Amino acid sequence: MRQVPFSFELHPARSDRVAQQLPDRIARLVAAGPEFVSVTYGAGGSSQDASLDVLKHVIDRHPEVRTMAHLTCVGSSVQSSHDTVRTFMDAGVHSFLAVRGDLPLGSTAEEFPGDIRSGAELVQLIQAVQHERAPWREVRLPGTPGITLDREGRERVVIAVAAFVNGHPSSRSFQQDIDTLLAKQAAGANLALTQLFFHADDYFRLVERARAAGVEFPIIPGILPVVSTSGVVRARELAGEQAPTQLVGRLGAEPTAEGQREIGIDFAAELVQQLVDGGAPGIHLYTRNLHETPLAVLARAGLIEAGLYERLVSTEFAGAPLA
């Protein structure tokens, strides 16, 4: 199988038990060699501090892996969003996933009036903060005394945006989704991560239409392994995606949790294989703060070695770099 980079999504812990387990799970995921690790951001910025804590942990303990901060803008002022971006950059984060986001559950737009109305506008703001923070790069040219200021050579941020394989729930048409990606590209986005989906052909259709329209940045498929009957419901709640009838039927017919997990991992691994074989530039796994399931998917899809997988899920793993 063609080797491609992979990445993981984490979210701030929602309980003390998960908070205690999260450092070990992060260490196991990072030891697999991801391209980056992203951390979600709650509705209306509700988990900003917690998100930053997780990002700082990864930066401090695992500097070998790039971090990506999710940012939402709904209900946010320009100044508050500017300050948030600056805070994340000052902490060492230079990659962002910029999304419009949803209002906190039960709230209304009147309760959260905001200045930034779209993901494209948030992309522009991130660019502006980076230019303000680091307008130049200082370089020493051989044989030249002193320092030269190089605008083009300054550090550039990675700004990812969301893509929807089967259309955004509020879009009027698939073409509107493509036009939105073009607007985000024009604003400065240089990467896209897709929402979860279940059919490789749907992803390739999105990429084909996006490329034909002029979208140039990589579009990385996002995969959520569905390993239980409750996971089917969660996938529908998260993205409005209905799991395939075949997968739902197999999960429903399997009485044990471990059996359902095996079915879900096999399905996700086969999907990853199809995506990689078809030319996907990477794989982004939604982990739900777990490590064994996403690592098993990578191992069965051939993106990490079986021996490495066994070491990463072993009870003897202590977070040390692997030889």
Image (cartoon, rainbow, N blue to C red):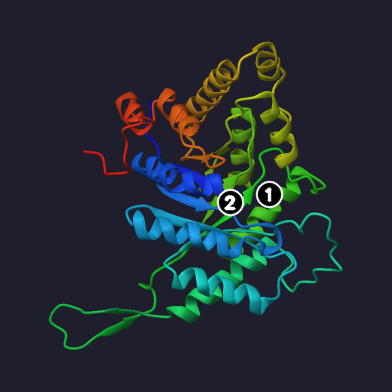
Residue on which the image places disc 1: 178
What residue is drawn where x is 47% and y is 28%? Answer: 297
The answer to which quarter of the image holds residue 180 is bottom right
Dot 1 amino acid type? Ile
Note whether residue 53 is visible.
yes
36 above or below 72? Answer: above
> Which image quadrant is residue 167 in?
top right
| Label at residue 38 | none
Residue closer to the observer: 185 or 92: 92
Q: Amino acid at mark 2?
A: Val
Side of 75 relative to 215 (left or right): right
Q: Position of residue 53 (x, y in %)?
A: 50, 61
Q: Nearer the viewer, residue 31 or 206?
A: 31
Residue at the left extreme? 143
Q: Secondary structure at mark 1?
A: helix
Mark 1 and mark 2 lie on one chain; the one further toward the N terminus is 1
Marks 1 and 2 sit apart, C-alpha to C-alpha, by 8 Å
